[in-house]
Image (tube, rainbow, N blue to C red):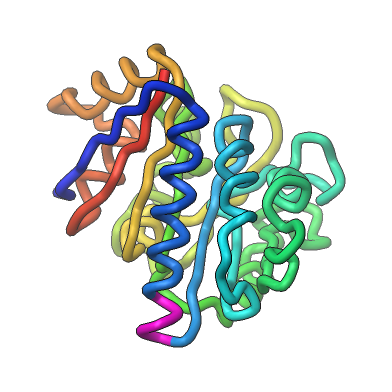
């Protein structure tokens, strides 16, 4: 089980600034030690402010690879696309120089696109130097939904794939997601949460002795130090 360290902040702005600095520092360490760095980010409303802080960090972004933890199987310009969110809020100014790899292909379904996505991700340095997760109110993280029939396979630690197709029954759209095995291999794993309700859900998920929700499975399987950043 991971050594999970909790970082509480008085404001979301303070959280965004501090998390962006920690992410940039981890990427800088990777660039110094290995010459390249890799970053996987989540979508939704929560990371927007952090993205806007991170894009101000002075790094050699041309040596950084960026991808998504998960995405809806939608065109990249769709309003609900995580790729669109990242392009609008992170891949700006100096970060435009980064090597970005999206998870959506021209295939009709995520199942049909799995091999192409795996091939697109192949050049990205692995394990990820930094991976940032969010969490839904049902305890899902990435697109590992507790309601989905694909959860057992996508969350299997011996799954050799980096990505899985997921069809949640409690949320719209087919999805593509990094597998749990790919997530927990990351060198620096961060969970970014806001709001008292999500904090309570997270605490309950971590305390449950059985029927582990996806967010708890991450920290059950991760090793080393992981971080949860939270503000009300």
Residue drawn at point x = 68 percent, y = 28 percent: 172
Report the magenta stretch's main SS.
helix
User: Where residue 139 appears, x then y in whole percent?
Assistant: 39, 27
Residue 186 visible to the viewer: yes
User: Where residue 44 appears, x then y in whole percent?
Assistant: 62, 34
Residue 141 occupies quadrant: top left
Residue drawn at point x = 48 percent, y = 42 percent: 17
> Is residue 20 found inside the magenta-colored segment of the image?
no
Foreground pick, 9 / 141: 9
Image check: 172 left or right of 155?
A: right
Foreground pick, 81 / 60: 60
Image check: 124 left or right of 114?
A: left
The quarter of the image holding the C terminus is: top left
Residue 93, above or below 160: above
Image check: 113 left or right of 20?
A: right
Residue 165 visible to the viewer: no
Give the tally of numbered discs: 0
> Is residue 32 found inside the magenta-colored segment of the image?
yes
Q: Which residues are magenta?
A: 30-34
Q: Residue furthest top?
A: 197
Residue 27, above or below 176: below
User: Where residue 131 appears, x then y in whole percent?
Assistant: 44, 56
User: Where residue 222 appears, x then y in whole percent?
Assistant: 24, 54
Residue drawn at point x = 43 percent, y = 51 percent: 154
Foreground pick, 161 / 22: 22
Residue drawn at point x = 59 percent, y = 76 percent: 60
């Amino acid at each position: 089980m991971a050594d999970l360290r909790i970082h509480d902040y008085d404001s979301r702005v303070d959280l965004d600034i501090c998390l962006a600095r920690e992410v940039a520092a981890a990427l800088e360490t990777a660039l110094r030690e290995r010459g390249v760095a890799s970053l996987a980010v989540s979508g939704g409303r929560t990371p927007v402010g952090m993205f806007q802080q991170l894009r101000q960090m002075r790094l050699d972004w041309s040596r950084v690879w960026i991808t998504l933890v998960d995405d809806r199987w939608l065109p990249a310009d769709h309003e609900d696309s995580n790729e669109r969110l990242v392009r609008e809020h992170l891949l700006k100014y100096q970060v435009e120089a980064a090597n970005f790899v999206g998870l959506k292909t021209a295939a009709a379904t995520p199942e049909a696109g799995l091999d192409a996505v795996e091939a697109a991700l192949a050049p990205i340095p692995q394990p990820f130097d930094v991976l940032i997760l969010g969490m839904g109110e049902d305890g899902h993280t990435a697109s590992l939904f507790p309601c989905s029939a694909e959860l057992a396979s996508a969350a299997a630690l011996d799954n050799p794939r980096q990505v899985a197709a997921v069809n949640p029954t409690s949320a719209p759209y087919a999805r593509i997601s990094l597998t749990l095995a790919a997530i927990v291999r990351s060198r620096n794993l961060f969970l970014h949460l806001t709001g008292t309700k999500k904090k309570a859900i997270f605490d309950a998920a971590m305390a449950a002795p059985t029927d582990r929700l996806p967010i708890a499975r991450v920290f059950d399987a991760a090793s080393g130090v992981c971080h949860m950043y939270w503000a009300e």
